[in-house]
Image (cartoon, rainbow, N blue to C red):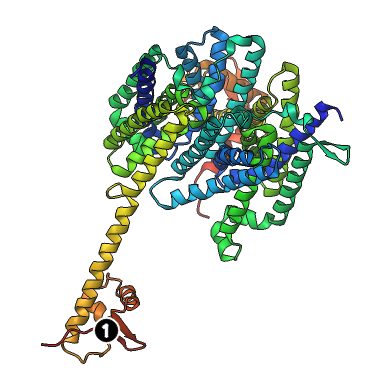
Amino acid sequence: MSPALEILLVAVLTAAACALPGAFLVLRRMSLVSDAISHAVLPGIVIGFLLTENLQHPLLLVLAGASGLLTVYLIELLEKTGRLREDAAIGLVFPALFSVGVLLIAQLADQVHLDTDAVLLGELAFVPFDRLQWQGIDLGPRALWTMAGLLLMNVLLLWLLYKELTLATFDAAAAAVLGFRPILLHYLLMGLVAVTVVAAFHAVGAILVIALMIGPPATALLLARRMPTYLLLSLLIGALSALPGYGMARVLDVSIAGSMATMVGVLFGLVWLLAPETGLLARWRRHRRQQLDFALDLLLLHLLHHEHQPAATVERHQDTLPAHLNWTSERLNIILAEGQRRGWLQRKGPEVHLTPAGRARATQLVETLAPARSP
Amino acid sequence: MDFTLRIVMTGAALLGLISGSLGTLAVLRRQGLIGDTVAHAALPGIVLAFLLSGSKASVVLQLGAAISGTLAMLWVQSVVRTTRIRFDAALGMALAVFFGLGVVLLSAAQHTAGAAQAGLDRFLFGQAATLLREDLLTMAVTGALALGLVLVFWKEVKLVLFDEAYAAALGLPVRWLQTLLIILLVVAIVIGLQTVGVVLMIAVIIAPAAAARQWSSRYGRVLLLAGLFGLLSGALGAWISNLAPRLPTGPIIVLLLTVLVLLSVLVAPARGLLWQRYRRRRARATAQQAVVAVLQELAHHHPEDYPHPTATIQAALGANVPVEAILRDLERRGKVQHKPGQGWHLTNPPHTP
């Protein structure tokens, strides 16, 4: 495998692995827990590094995971006092833990060659250099194996707990009544998030982990209406944002993690604007269409109402219509053109007349608008 | 005190004062985490400002930071308004995406500007030592402007903070006021980035307000206290970090603030957890005395171990005293005895005169 392909593969696997627990975080309104955990793992990593003097040691993962869970526990402890809201609790706990990590690094700068930048930003470009060897055989980059394992674990666990987690997410009370232990599920999900964050940020950095956990599920939420579609789309969109991200990084020679995070945003923006039915553009067009329909109906009713009155010639004159309907004459022209296109209106000199089809439409409107008559 | 230390301490104190007091605008609305998004989203603005102007002056970079921070929040607001995505997810995504863009721009700047860009990363983790006298002036002026705006719109700000629907019903331009609040917050955050950095800025926004909230329930006092807490922790943190080598200012300030919040949660009068525990204990003692008094009174007219039903004691004390629970408590302490199915009597009844 070429190094580029290896990096790309790791990126796709990481994105997919993050999207799954992230999808549940987004639904449970706990997205920012990923932010908190990804910062708060720093002291765990520093202590692990001090003990093992090896950034690859599995103990680091364990300690980092532990400080991730500690973060969640402390946040809930503070919240339970009733004196601090959730946002304040999150915003206190993770900066404090991060500060401890930074201070440790600063104090032990002689012994620890750990860069806070590296923890935050990660460096996907280094992935191919750290290889897994087994009896002298090169098995590929270590990160490839970690991420594949992580993805497998997340898929397996969420597949097993799909029903329970979904129920606990949408109706925690019902889940508790049915004996599904929502609190246990909550901590399980938090544990999963912590492990995922820790395993992933080593390759891609804390910030990209947040982008990959929240961005693809948020994008999927714009499109999906059912849980299975939502999860599948999250996975797919996550994997998909890795490709253009890596491409941009290669072409412009910039940070891979940074451009992947940017692409997560670009992809979201595109869907936000262009999604069929729910996209901003589709909604804007629907809105315009409804405005036009309404205006045209109003004009038809107006003409029908005055058709046999003495003042009919005045009422249907193109110079009085704008004043009577409170339209500009440009707007009248647009609506007249649409009415003629639909075959409901015809112009006779300066007057606007109903066609038979237009009269039928207007009469039908009167029928539907009139209060129901007693038989 | 040497000159640099004086500058750094003044800067940290100013930052604490401004960010701390303005932070109440987010924390009291339960939206403190806006601070994290704005702080991270400042990065692309900082780098772009440098790339476009070629200058590394703090004012220029802070202007860029403010613009991109505001843009990120406007994006968050419009996503929340037009989709079913919740505020937390929108905040998290804006944070990561803007920061990612910032990292891209930073790495591009390293190619194009070479060594000239060195020092931009002081905004990432903060370096109080890079503060200059001019920076203090900028901080003071922008901070005074922001706090002045809060004073001018005092009534409106309070209404939007605590009862948005009522504010809208009164005909206030709620959307504009919300945008004003966000711009004020952005100012509060951008001011501090150079000293404490992108990651830790959130704590300087949230902690003073969270601590101050424990001491008072009046908005004016909370704002003043938050400013005071921020000022003290800033100055003290800068001083401590000067005591020994390799004590970065940002983390020290954050840890001081954390301790302050924990202390406030424990000992603040009225809301403090320790006071609450003390009050509960005293209330329980009073209730126990009342129950014992009733049993003593009854004991005057009955044999020593005559069991009085719970209902009798309840009737003597009124319906809203948890008599059953108090009796169980007293039983555990050996003060009363329970005859199942009959009632209660004192273990050491008073001697009838």
On screen, residue A9 versus residue A122, left or right, reads: right
Q: Residue at x 21, y 73 (%)?
A: B290
The answer to whether residue A303 shows anywhere in this view is no
In percent of width and height, residue A321 lies at 50, 21
The residue wearing badge 1 is B347
The residue most toward the bottom is B303
Neighbor class of circle 1 (other Cα within 10 Å; few <14, some 14-19, many 20+) is: some
Q: Residue at x 26, y 64 (%)?
A: B283
**Quadrant containing the N terminus of chain B in the rendered view:** top left
The residue most toward the left is B353
In the image, A356 versus A85, the foreground residue is A85
On screen, residue B25 versus residue A141, left or right, reads: left
**Is A81 above or below relative to B206?**
below
In percent of width and height, residue B247 lies at 47, 29
In the image, B91 versus A127, the foreground residue is A127
The chain holding disc 1 is B
The answer to whether residue B227 shows anywhere in this view is yes
Q: Amino acid at mark 1?
A: Thr
**Is A142 above or below relative to B9?**
below
Q: Residue at x 58, y 37 (%)?
A: A42
In the image, A67 versus A114, the foreground residue is A114
The residue most toward the top is B54
